[in-house]
Image (spheres, helix red, strand yellow):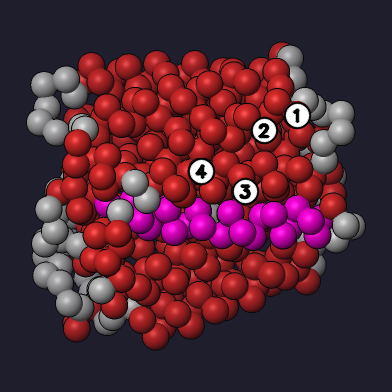
Amino acid sequence: MTHHLRQYFANPVLRMVFWATVLSGAMAAPIGTYQSLIAIERLGVADGQFAVILILGLFVGTVASLWIGVVTDQRPWRRKAGLAVAGGLALGNILMWLAPSAPMFLAVHGFLMPLMVTLFGQLFAVARLAAGNLPAADRDAAVANVRAFFAVPFIFVLPIWGWLVGAGASLLAVYGAGSVLALIMVAVIYRGWPDDSNAPWEDRKSGLTLRGSLAEIADPAVIIRVALIGLIHVGASASGIVLGLIFARADGQGAGDVALFFGAFVAIEFTVMMMIGSLRARWRRLHIITVGVILYAIYLVGLPLLAGSPLVWLLILPAGAGGAMIYALAVGYLQDLLGTRAGAGSSLIALQRAVAEGTGAAIFAFGTWVYGYAIVPWIAATISILAMMAIIRLDRFRPN
């Protein structure tokens, strides 16, 4: 682990990626954790309307990520794209902070907050380029570090928000803090992201038209695997939607406990992610991901059963360890599907996220219609395990 960290921080571009990732995580942690409570409990958005907003955000984020990913593989616009996306996130936070309402929530979470996945994809693309000359295990470790650094603020920031909310602070204050963090992130990208003409790596432009790039992404061998990777992430999507709601309905647990629970399992997630380089040197990528899917399914099955009991805190172990194995290595798997296409390869993250969160929103709508919040994570656990089985069968003859 120390070896991989030394390699990472010795590179000035990766240091910039570190700060941008940490800032984006500090902004996303409370907003992602409390968005369902803010929309449904605070602003009066109905369950069905909230599902529609999630789907709209997925569509916007996916289209933006694909377009920017393809264009930045064609033209030297990576830095410009990073600045534009970070600026859009700052604007979204400011609008929700100054004028919170149900229509504003729709506008911001439907059109501006989805840019987070676009920025995330570009940071992964730059990390991939900056680590391009490293061995495969070290490249996986460098990309895994980006995801791990995103998780760091969840460990420290969420407990603070849990204490503040428990003490009576407004949930809408998360957008005020998000505004400040997003503006700092713009400054970090402006100062540290190298201009494409002076970038310290060889960025081979694709030479493909937009249509050709999209055709490459739509190849069945690629798109089927992207969809399946999305489905193994559906557990995290479903958990993000219902965790706060299940806790809010549980006796003796409230909004403050949501942040503490989330922060606790992310601390475990971060610890395991920082070990991914060592694990990856010994075992195949898909084997590690499979173990992660099984562990996360255990968490999903146990969540509705143990919510309201002190035993629910035991679930931070399978949630953190399982999530780390999935998140850290699925990105490298997706990037390898398109080889040297750093931008388009990273835009596949948005596609798998669209599958994951679109399916999660559909499960949420269906589950609340037929039974209630409790059934949602059980459906998600079943889908993620079946998807992992399909990936193993598809790739059983592929080299690691």
Please tell me whether residue 15 is drawn above or below residue 291 in the rendered image: below
Between disc 1 and disc 4, whose residue precedes? 4
Q: Amino acid at mark 3?
A: Gly
Q: Residue at x 23, y 16 (%)?
A: 393
* Mark closer to the chain start, 3 or 4: 3
Earlier residue among tags 3 and 1? 3
Q: Which residue in the structure is indicated by mark 3?
A: 263
Left or right, 50 with reference to 381: right
Residue at image point 24% right, 60% down: 3
Rendered image: mark on residue 339: none
Q: Can you see residue 69?
A: no
Residue on which the image places disc 2: 313
Q: Which residue is mark 1?
A: 310
Q: Considering only vertical position in the picture, is 154 above or below 186?
A: above
Q: Nearer the viewer, mark 3 or mark 2?
A: 2
Q: Considering only order in the chain, which callout, 4 or 2, is on the residue closer to the N terminus? A: 4
